[in-house]
Image: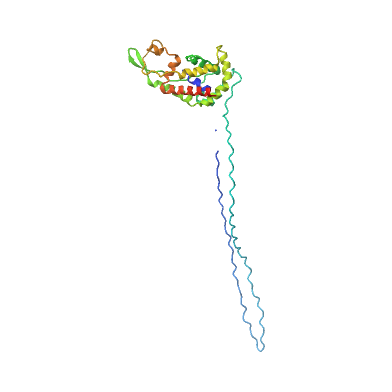
């Protein structure tokens, strides 16, 4: 049964740092050796001494002196720049899918909303007329029933298994509970606050669909009643005897078999899944009542 999913629908820098490697080479200066040539001794002629001819003295070319390095100026301490004050964060509510204007042709918008709330649930949707199907399902749950026909979802699961206990009596296999794990897990991941916001924003359209049923009261009243029904289901029986008078298995105990279809479906979820479902219904009810 897909009653569990009924609750869920209503309810995205990296930087790179580079570095620069700097290298330099030092020029070499060639030194020019100074060369000094001495003049030969003058020849002396007798009887009169002759003055020696002047010898031109080679003067070494000036060598460019390597400039002395200029001492690096000491960095004067600078006052640190004041840290920029962080801009105040502006909290924004996430953008939600707005409700369609008309009930007709509203399935694409419903799919977008379900994708936003619980993407894994999209695979179970059964269009067309999703909104009308959800409203009808909620109305049935409020009466303790299960929407077998015109269900808004189709949840594939393994067959229900039993173990024989004699005298054409059976007990349910404990492994049956795991059949509902995927469905309950999707529901449990839905943020209750987001589900409540969607519910309020889509409520006028839901009320319009409920009005088509020709029933008294409001859809909001029926929805809260449905949540209350789920919360009120008592502890599931353990080891209860079953028999199969017709096609389906039934409880041998008339009192157990007399429970509402919704109650018996919640029992079949198993204790853990049942608590998850009831917690979700309780939290969603509280959120809707708080606002």
Residue 263: tell me if it is visible. yes
Q: Extreme left residue here?
A: 166
Question: Viewer-proximal residue, 254 or 112?
Answer: 254
Q: Name the residue located 50 percent from the left edge and 23 percent from the top edge.
A: 286
Q: Extreme top residue here?
A: 245
Position of 166 compared to 79: left or right?
A: left
State the image quarter where residue 206 is shown. Answer: top right
Residue 129: tell me if it is visible. no
Residue 287 higher or lower than 40, as above or below: above
Question: Viewer-proximal residue, 93 or 39?
Answer: 93
Q: Name the residue located 48 percent from the left edge and 22 percent from the top edge.
A: 282
Position of 151 compared to 270: left or right?
A: right
State the image quarter where residue 58 is shown. Answer: bottom right
State the image quarter where residue 210 is shown. Answer: top right
Is the C terminus in the top left, top right, bottom left or bottom right quadrant? top right
Picture coordinates of residue 226 (x, y %)?
49, 17
Residue 196 higher or lower than 254, as above or below: below
Picture coordinates of residue 45 (x, y %)?
65, 86
Question: Viewer-proximal residue, 85 or 270?
Answer: 85
């Amino acid at each position: 049964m897909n009653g569990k999913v009924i609750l869920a629908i209503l309810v995205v820098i990296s930087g790179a740092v580079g570095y620069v490697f700097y290298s330099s080479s030092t020029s070499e200066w060639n030194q020019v050796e100074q060369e000094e040539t001495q003049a030969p001794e003058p020849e002396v002629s007798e009887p009169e001494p002759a003055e020696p001819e002047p010898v031109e003295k080679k003067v070494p070319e000036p060598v460019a002196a390597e400039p002395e390095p200029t001492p690096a100026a000491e960095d004067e301490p600078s006052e640190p720049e004041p840290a920029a004050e962080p801009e105040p964060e502006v909290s924004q509510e996430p953008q939600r899918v707005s409700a369609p204007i008309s009930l007709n042709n509203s399935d694409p918008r419903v799919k977008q909303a379900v994708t936003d709330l619980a993407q894994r649930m999209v695979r179970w949707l059964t269009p067309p007329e999703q909104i009308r199907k959800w409203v009808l399902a909620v109305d049935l749950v409020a009466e303790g029933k299960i929407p077998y026909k015109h269900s808004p979802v189709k949840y594939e699961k393994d067959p229900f298994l039993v173990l024989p206990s004699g005298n054409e009596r059976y007990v349910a296999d404990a492994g049956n509970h795991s059949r509902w794990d995927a469905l309950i897990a999707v529901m449990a991941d839905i943020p209750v606050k987001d589900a409540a916001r969607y519910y309020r924003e889509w409520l006028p359209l839901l009320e319009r669909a409920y009005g088509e049923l020709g029933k008294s009261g409001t859809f909001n009243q029926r929805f809260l009643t449905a949540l209350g029904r789920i919360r009120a289901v008592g502890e599931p029986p353990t080891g209860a005897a079953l028999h199969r008078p017709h096609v389906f298995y039934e409880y041998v105990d008339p009192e157990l078999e007399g429970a509402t279809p919704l109650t018996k479906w919640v029992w079949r979820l198993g204790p853990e899944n049942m608590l998850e479902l009831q917690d979700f219904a309780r939290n969603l009810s509280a959120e809707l009542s708080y606002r």
